[in-house]
Amino acid sequence: MKNNTTEKRTVANPWEEGQLEAFADSLRQGERSLSTRRQYGREVRRFREWMRGRALDKEAVISYKEILEKTYRPASVNTKLAAINSFLAFLGRQEWKVKLLRIQRSAYCSGERELSRQEYQQLVMAARRKGDERLCVLLQTVCSTGIRISELSFITVEAVTAGEAVVRLKGKSRTVLLPEKLRCLLRKYLRRTGITHGAVFVTRSGAPMDRSNIWKQMKALGEAAAVPEQKVFPHNLRHLFARCFYEVGKDIAKLADVLGHSSINTTRLYIISSGQEHRRQLERLGLLA
């Protein structure tokens, strides 16, 4: 079976919907996550809209890259370019791919998006005040285990009983331990909801909750919790877990294993401190008379 990412494809019109559907299928065959497949599809369609009336070649891709650089942050530009490069590889046009932007790692992160422990607790309390037990328990589950939202469906009744969840995604498998206090919280929630098997967090129809469900509910919760909107998104709970875990043991290799990272360089992005904490460290150096 030929690999679509390397086989040269002769395509009269690369923007036909059938080609985009075939691209999406190639991503699925490559075992890319659902969120990645959706994101790549969105970005390629946006590129298609911009390309109307233009011939697709390396110069067009470079021009689009230059426009992105003027509009978005470097990290966002690279995300969009990764999707386009993947599509070009699918078409067999490796020579049209463009280089991603080189981003120097910052010594600290912006405090504007860093969710603090107190703000997390405010979110939990706000969900409790609203009587939204599912969201209240969900927030605590994600933040106390460090799982990705895409991994939430692996938190099952069976996992609660066993005390651990086996997460299998992207051809990789890892075991996520459930703290005893979390297991007690989940068992109480299961008794009240009557859920006896399968995923713990489900919609009214019984389907596992997905990123869009949770994103909307968290955004609605932010105002009631008096937490800035830019800090309220699911992945920020994982970042908070990473910082708290690292503060306890200062073991970045162990943290990488817990988070399911294949590279410690990825894990480093999760534990950089805010500018405020960075300034406090500079003050403690005692290098000024």
Image (cartoon, rainbow, N blue to C red):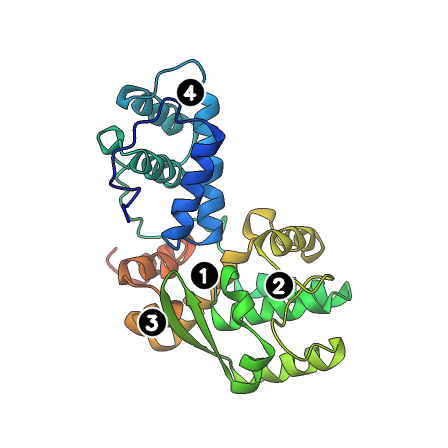
Callout 4 amino acid: Met
Callout 2 amino acid: Pro
Left or right position of 263 against 187: left
Q: Residue at x 56, y 53 (%)?
A: 233
N-term mark: 2 or 3: 2
Callout 1 amino acid: His
Q: Is residue 109 visible?
A: no
Name the element at disc 2. loop
In this rendered view, identify the residue nearer to me: 198 or 269. 198
Where residue 208 is drawn, which disc sits there?
Answer: 2
In this rendered view, identify the residue nearer to me: 154 or 221. 154
Where residue 239 is drawn, which disc sits there?
Answer: 1
Q: Residue at x 39, y 76 (%)?
A: 248
Query: What's the distance in space between the residues labelled 4 and 3, CA to CA?
Result: 42 Å
- Which residue is under mark 4? 51
- Which residue is under mark 3? 257
Callout 3 amino acid: Asp
Residue 251 drawn at (x, y percent): 30, 74
Query: What's the distance in space between the residues labelled 2 and 4, CA to CA?
Result: 37 Å
Query: What's the distance in space between the residues labelled 4 and 1, CA to CA?
Result: 37 Å
- The residue mark sitting in front, 2 or 3, is 2
Mark 3 is surrounded, within 10 Å at the Cα level, by few (under 14), some (14 to 19) or many (20 or more) other residues, namely: some
Mark 4 is surrounded, within 10 Å at the Cα level, by few (under 14), some (14 to 19) or many (20 or more) other residues, namely: some
In this rendered view, identify the residue nearer to me: 184 or 164. 164
N-term mark: 4 or 3: 4
**Cβ atoms at labels 2 and 4 below 8 Å apart:** no
